[in-house]
Image (cartoon, grey):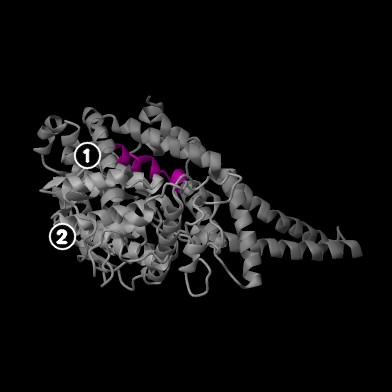
Amino acid sequence: MTGIGGVEMGALAARTRALAVLRVRSRAVAVALLPAAAAVILLVGGSTGHLVGGGWDVLRRVVSVLALCVLLAAAGVALVVARSRPAVTPTVTVAEESAPDLYRMVRDLADRLDVPAPSAIALTPDCDSWLEERAHPHPGPPPVDRHDDDLSGLGEPARRRGAAAAPVLVIGSPFLWWMRVGELRAVLAPVVAGTGPSAHPDIAAARRFIRGLDAAVAVASADRRDPLSRVACAGLGWVSRLLLRGCREHATGMERGVAAAAAERAQAVDYGLRIVAQEQVGLAYAGWDRLLTRVALPAWRMGRWPSRLDVGVVAALTELSRRDRLAEGFASRLGERPACDLLEEPGTMDEAVSLLAARLFHGGPAETGPDWSPVGWGEYPEEVVDRTWRTDAARLHRVLDTLGVRRAAGGTAPGTDGPTLARVLDHLTTPDAETPVPSPTDPHTGYGDPGAPDPGAGAQAGYDDRGAPPPRYGNHDAPDHDAPDDEDEDDLAGTTARGAALAAGLSAQLAREEAQARPGGAGVPSSPPGPGAGAGPDAALWDGRALPLLPLQPPRTGREILTAHITAMVCCAAMDTAGAAPGLDWLDGPSLLVDGARTADLAPSVLSLVETGDPGPLRAWMADLGIRPEKPVRLV
């Protein structure tokens, strides 16, 4: 719907809400000046002989001191709001010389929409695109005087408006690699159109005020030991939050108006293609999420970061389309020019974005090193999958040693003392007299077989030299407790006693390993990191204390940890005794290959062993593939 004089109705609503935000700021200034105005009245009344006497003199002094304190406090709050740096999304800045075609396409799009072009372009490891204000507010020339109801500024060409810096266009990197050029232009059209309403002085001033308040709240929330600083930050935080509450509804309405105006303006550009491109947005999101959680996360846990995540998402989406029988529909679009061709060096950009993704989603170091190095997709099976399985298998046997489980399990050849899968199977196999672990609501406290080792005592015996359990996996800052929490008890309810003890020991061992590795991964680089010149995460955006900013998954439960370690041990036995090989599935992550084909039905067999202590399905599965559990395996 078009408003007055060709101005979008959304822009009119956004400016109305922006003025409401500015009125909140004006009221705050008026409240701060009110004591000073009262002091001026009292001082003038005394100097003219109207307000004389001892009582008036005392009142003058009290009000003057109060006015001075309020003015100093207001000046401090205003200074912090004006000078605080707002939170900025970590991105990889794309220089114009490294992507001239991309900048040309965005500027042409801005010209067609009759809006200001974004001041810069940046990439983010996410399936989204937006405009982000990054220019620090500087005092500029006063705007041209006009009546408050004059709306011409919303509809006139952007180049005749104020000289405020345009926002930065942030593009999700999976869009560049998966979408075609036309699809990317159609998706970016409503985003770029948002620079039009954003350039209006009232909307820009309202946004600066809200960002300043948000930054002031962050400053007030910082930990400080000085009592005076804590008092000052408490006052700053109270005032900033009070103003934010007063602006919240108007700020939300303003942003909705800006989005509505941008969508309305962008309807004239590639509208039909945008409908098709939106389908690719949802597909890219699904493939990107699957790639990060199933493929990248195991590598990050091993201290390796895949250096071509965006190339991987193309492979994952291609595999997804093949499995869903959508390949015919994608064949025509894959023949068009991909949007990553708009970059001069897409490989360098992909590497920089991949490192940024590892930093954001996993909290890894900002620079490569001996314990944090890139890995290519061709090296992934050997460098990540094989090492992950053998590391987990080694950890499993270390915990078994801690629990006092004998090395030579039943069926092992005489003289063999190496780590075997049979040792794990024999330990977890539930005797006929043993029952599963009761749930926390069970009135009985026993774990089943009286002869079975107590899971709590057995696991605690190997925790550390002091006999106290370390922090639970994934929560290293929590205080130590002798008893597991209710959530973990619920997770292990229904498993066997030995399985619960082994899961507790594995969780404790993982917690210790992560706690030892954590101090080396939170450093802030002294120089902007990046695999190539001009391509790297912005160093000024990092705060190692807050990483990972966006963890991919919650901490694994004890059942999940035990299942993963047993699966790893089975895969190691398959590789060492049956000629299997590690592989990479783009949608499911690490996989076991037998004769070049991916194996199936392993997970239900492992779960049967974990939950009921029945090794029958797993032994039958191994017998079909020729896996010999009594043979020692190679560990790391």
Q: Amino acid at mark 2?
A: Glu
Nearest to the observer: residue 58 or residue 435: 435
Which residue: 56% across, 66% down? 223
Q: Would residue 116 be visible to someone looking at this image?
A: no
Q: Main secondary structure of the magenta part?
A: helix
Q: Quadrant of the N terminus?
A: top left
Residue 338 is marked as none
Which residue: 21% across, 60% down? 386
**Sooner in the amino-acid sequence: mark 2 or mark 1:** 1
Q: Identify whether 221 is placed above or below 116.
A: below
Q: Is residue 624 magenta?
A: no
Q: Identify whether 530 is placed above or below 338.
A: below
Badge 2 crowding class, 10 Å Cα cut-off, few under 14, some 14 to 19, many 20 or more, is: few
Disc 1: which residue: 185
Q: Would residue 438 be visible to someone looking at this image?
A: yes
Residue 379 is marked as 2
Q: Which residues are magenta?
A: 189-204
Q: Secondary structure at mark 1?
A: helix
Q: Identify whether 512 is placed above or below 436.
A: below
